[in-house]
């Protein structure tokens, strides 16, 4: 029971932090570190300072006594962290290409002309044959797809926190009054501690962080891809349409195969129309000889991107924010001092 306790004003956070109980150094020392209230016997002060009654009285009169308390404590810490990162990815794409080709050809053509005529000497038949050649052309198309790849990267960041603690010492100054209750014989028995004068200060020591930092998921930006890298198209055969040949009028004809002295025009001349009793003029297309194919330009179709293959994430630097301080927790008993001398 503290019959001569010291009344100390309560200082919310720091007072609570210095609240660890303490075993009095002497039977005449009674101290509550939560409030700073207590009692210190006169003899304890004299022992600590090496004062006799006169020296102690002088110190009291000059108000040169200062009572303080110190208590080891630890303080919880937290800190926000941001980490940068980057990621490389690859993407496959499919592209269709179309190519048009042109092919020239020649075709053999034969013509057989036969006519039956009449004149003053009776009827007769004339037969003629000739060969020729004509040019033609056709176009074809071919289509094929090929696969390409492109590389890209994207930036990332993630948020995290880390917690830790730091050791320290809480130091507070105590207000006091003399215990004059027994001063009938000009004596006093000790000092009444009235409580903390202001808020105890915290002298921080070494910091210890828990590890590792606890990060959340990465938050990625958009991919930034480079150009597609495609191989060559591997085309198959052209799919050709029909040849478009020159008309018969443009056939390059050879000489007529005829009996000497006979002329095919005798069958075809309009002046002889009344003498021609029968006429056969047959043109027959022959074999086609194809020439080389001339490849046209390749027309690239749209690229159809496939899924992106994510590569490894390269972790960058971590940026730490300000340190948030938490509760101070006493880690040892409080000690009383007078003029920096332990009681």
Image (cartoon, rainbow, N blue to C red):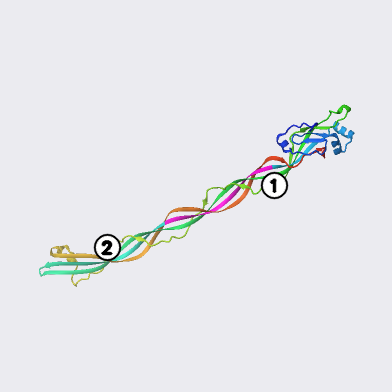
Q: Does the magenta portion include 49?
A: no
User: Dot 1: what SS?
Assistant: strand
Mark 2 or mark 1: name the one nearer the start of the chain.
1
Direction from residue 37 to residue 242 in the image, left or right: left
Residue at which label 1 appears: 208
Direction from residue 176 to residue 103 in the image, left or right: left
Tag of residue 250:
2
Task: Identify which residue is drawn at 52% across, 51% down.
Answer: 224
Classify mark 2: residues with Cα within 10 Å, few (<14), some (14-19) or many (20+).
few
To which quarter of the image does residue 62 belong?
A: top right
To which quarter of the image does residue 266 belong?
A: bottom left
Direction from residue 4 to residue 247 in the image, left or right: left
Q: Are marks 2 and 1 in contact (CB under 8 Å)?
A: no
Q: Is residue 200 shown above or below 286?
A: above
Residue 10: give x, y in percent of width and height: 73, 33
Q: Is residue 114 shown above or below 215?
A: below
Tag of residue 51:
none
Q: Nearer the viewer, residue 231 or 207?
A: 207
Q: Is residue 150 shown above or below 204?
A: below
Direction from residue 198 to residue 223 in the image, left or right: left
Residue 39: give x, y in percent of width and height: 81, 33
Which region is colored magenta? 76-96
Task: Identify which residue is drawn at 20% across, 67% down.
Answer: 113
| Count of numbered badges drawn on the protein | 2
Residue 181: give x, y in percent of width and height: 84, 28
Marks 2 and 1, how far apart in space?
101 Å
What is the chief secondary structure element of the magenta stretch?
Answer: strand
Task: Identify which residue is drawn at 82% across, 32% down.
Answer: 191
To which quarter of the image does residue 141 belong?
A: bottom left
Residue 132: give x, y in percent of width and height: 26, 67
Q: Does the magenta portion include 91?
A: yes
Q: Nearer the viewer, residue 191 or 232?
A: 191
């Amino acid at each position: 029971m503290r019959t001569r306790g010291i009344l100390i004003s309560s200082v919310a956070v720091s007072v609570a932090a210095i609240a660890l109980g303490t075993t009095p150094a002497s039977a005449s020392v009674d101290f509550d570190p939560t409030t700073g209230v207590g009692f210190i016997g006169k003899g304890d002060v004299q022992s600590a300072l090496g004062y006799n009654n006169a020296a102690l009285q002088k110190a009291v009169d000059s108000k040169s006594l200062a009572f303080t308390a110190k208590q080891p404590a630890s303080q919880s810490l937290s800190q926000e962290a941001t980490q940068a990162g980057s990621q490389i990815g690859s993407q496959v794409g499919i592209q269709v290409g179309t190519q048009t080709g042109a092919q020239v050809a020649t075709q053999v053509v034969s013509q057989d002309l036969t006519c039956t005529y009449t004149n003053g000497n009776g009827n007769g038949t004339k037969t003629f044959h000739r060969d020729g050649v004509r040019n033609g052309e056709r176009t074809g198309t071919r289509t094929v797809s090929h696969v390409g790849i492109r590389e890209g990267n994207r930036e990332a960041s993630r948020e995290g926190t880390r917690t830790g603690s730091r050791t320290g010492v809480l130091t507070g100054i105590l207000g006091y009054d003399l215990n004059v209750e027994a001063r009938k014989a000009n004596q006093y028995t000790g000092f009444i501690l009235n409580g903390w004068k202001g808020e105890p200060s915290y002298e921080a020591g070494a910091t210890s962080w828990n590890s590792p930092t606890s990060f959340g998921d990465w938050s990625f930006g958009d991919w930034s891809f480079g150009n597609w890298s495609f191989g060559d198209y591997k085309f198959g055969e052209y799919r050709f349409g029909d040849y478009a040949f020159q008309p018969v009028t443009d056939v390059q004809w050879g000489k007529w195969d005829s009996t000497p002295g006979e002329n095919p025009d005798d069958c075809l001349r309009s002046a002889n129309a009344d003498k021609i009793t029968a006429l056969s003029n047959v043109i027959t297309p022959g074999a086609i000889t194809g020439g080389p194919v001339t490849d046209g330009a390749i027309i690239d179709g749209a690229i159809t991107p496939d899924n992106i293959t994510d590569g490894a994430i390269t972790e960058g630097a971590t940026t730490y924010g300000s340190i948030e301080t938490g509760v101070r927790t006493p880690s040892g008993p409080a000690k009383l001092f007078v003029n920096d001398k332990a009681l």
